[in-house]
Structure formats: structure tokens, C-alpha cells
Amino acid sequence: MARRSLWASCLATLLCLPLLVGCNPATNASVPIGCAQASSPCLKGKATVLLTTSRGEITLELDGDAAPVTAGNFVDLVRRGVYNGTVFHRVVREPVPFVVQGGDPASKDPNTAKAAYGSGSFIDPASGQARYIPLEVKFKKEDQPRYGRVTSNPSDLLQIELAHDRGALAMARSQAPDSASAQFYIALRPLPELDGRYAVFGRVVQGMEVVDAIQADDRITKAALLTPTP
């Protein structure tokens, strides 16, 4: 029984990890829903992004068909250079492989204490406010993604367009569904327990061995868009 309780505690801790994005009061502000109201350009079709890291290169394919708002936000941040110099601040492989998480804009500032990594969001220079995007999940039999809704219905979860497979690229957020900003994570193994709760918007197509080698405090030296967007 003690061993079972320890495992349950470890699993609960793992499930909470992607939630650990700094909770700012601004996350309660109105968040645009869908492309018609998106605060950043939506992505149509696919796009390819190259992450050059201190461990090597990782090639990401973004899916704007299934996650136009989330993928478009990521492309916009790449174009702005937001990810250049940021740290992979959370790497979880024990007791089982889980995620590699990074992309906190505050982590590129040498004056930011390591203890504060994971608490930052993208601050839009035009408004001076943090930009947040809604939880976006696309289902195979539906024309448009669902926004701002955590899904736990087992039959719905079987129809998710972009699942948490190994190498899935998804957005981290706080407990509020519409609080994703810039931080992202890559799944180190299939994580079906996160499907419907977090927005997957792409996948690793090359360099998964680099992801497997990343350690906490490794950096993204540069993020670059390789393919033009429509």
C-alpha cells in the first residue's frame, strides 16, 4: 500500500508540472477566442521551425490546420526572437519520462533568478500587457477547434486531432485554461492523461535524440522559421 501511495503521489506531481506557469492577475482578463479575435496572426497550414539549442538542433512541424491560434502565436514569437536565449527550465525524466519545458521569456535575462524561471509570459510591446491565448483543441469530426474548454469525456478524447504522442509540442499554462502565453513543452513519451487539458500544436520531426539529451538550464540559442507561412 505504501508503494502504491508513493506512485500515486509521484504521478500527481508529474501531472501538475505543466501547470506551473506563473499566475499573474492578468490571466483573468478577457482572452480572444478563435482566429477572428486572435491577438496574434493565425497559422494556416503547416510551418517548420528550427530550434538551435546548446545540445543540437530540433526541427518542429507546426499544425495550423488543427491549432491555428496556438501555432500562429508560436510562429509570431519565433519571428520576434522571443525564444532566442531562453532556458529549458524544467526537465522531468524520473520516475518516468515526462516533459522538457522551456520558452519563458524572462529566462533570457541574466538578472532573472533561476527560482523565477517558469513564471514569465510574453509581454506585447505594443500594449505593455501579457499576451494570453485560449486553450485550443481540435476534434476529428468537427470543423473548428474548441476553445477555452477542458475536455475529459473518454469518447471525445479518442477523436482528438493532435494527441500527446512522444515528441508532441504543446503549450504550458497555469490552472486557468486560457492562460498559455509563450512557454511550451515537448512530450518525452505518450501522455494521454494530458489530452483535452493542454493544447498540442505540433511535433518534433527531427532531433528527438537532442530533446532526450536536454538538461535543465540548457538554452535555445536561436529559433528560426524555415518555411514561409501562407
Image (tube, rainbow, N blue to C red):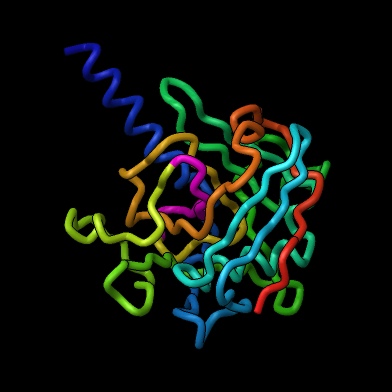
Residue 174: in magenta span: yes
Task: Identify the image quadrant of residue 15.
Answer: top left
Q: Along the line of sight, which residue is nearer the eye, 99 or 175?
A: 99
Q: Where is residue 35 in the image (x, y as percent from the top left)?
A: 51, 82
Q: Position of residue 201 (x, y in %)?
A: 50, 60
Q: Is residue 67 above or below residue 196?
A: below
Q: Where is residue 130 in the image (x, y as percent from the top left)?
A: 63, 67
- Which residue, as the protein is rendered here, is positioned at the far top? 2
Residue positioned 58% across, 74% down in the render:
43
Is residue 63 visible in the rendered image? The answer is: yes
Q: Give the range drawn in magenta.
A: 166-176
Q: How many circles with numbers are drawn on the protein?
A: 0
Residue 58: in magenta span: no
Q: Is residue 223 above or below residue 18?
A: below
Q: Where is residue 192 in the image (x, y as percent from the top left)?
A: 32, 44
Q: Along the line of sight, which residue is nearer the eye, 92 or 111?
A: 92
Relative placement, left or right, of 46 versus 162 is right
Task: Identify the image quadrant of residue 211.
Answer: top right
Q: Along the line of sight, which residue is nearer the eye, 168 or 174?
A: 168
Residue positioned 19% across, 57% down in the render:
153
Relative placement, left or right, of 182 versus 36 is right
Residue positioned 56% across, 37% down in the render:
100
Is residue 26 visible in the rendered image? The answer is: no
Residue positioned 16% across, 13% down in the render:
1
Q: Is residue 126 above or below residue 205?
A: below
- Which residue, as the protein is rendered here, is positioned at the far bottom? 36
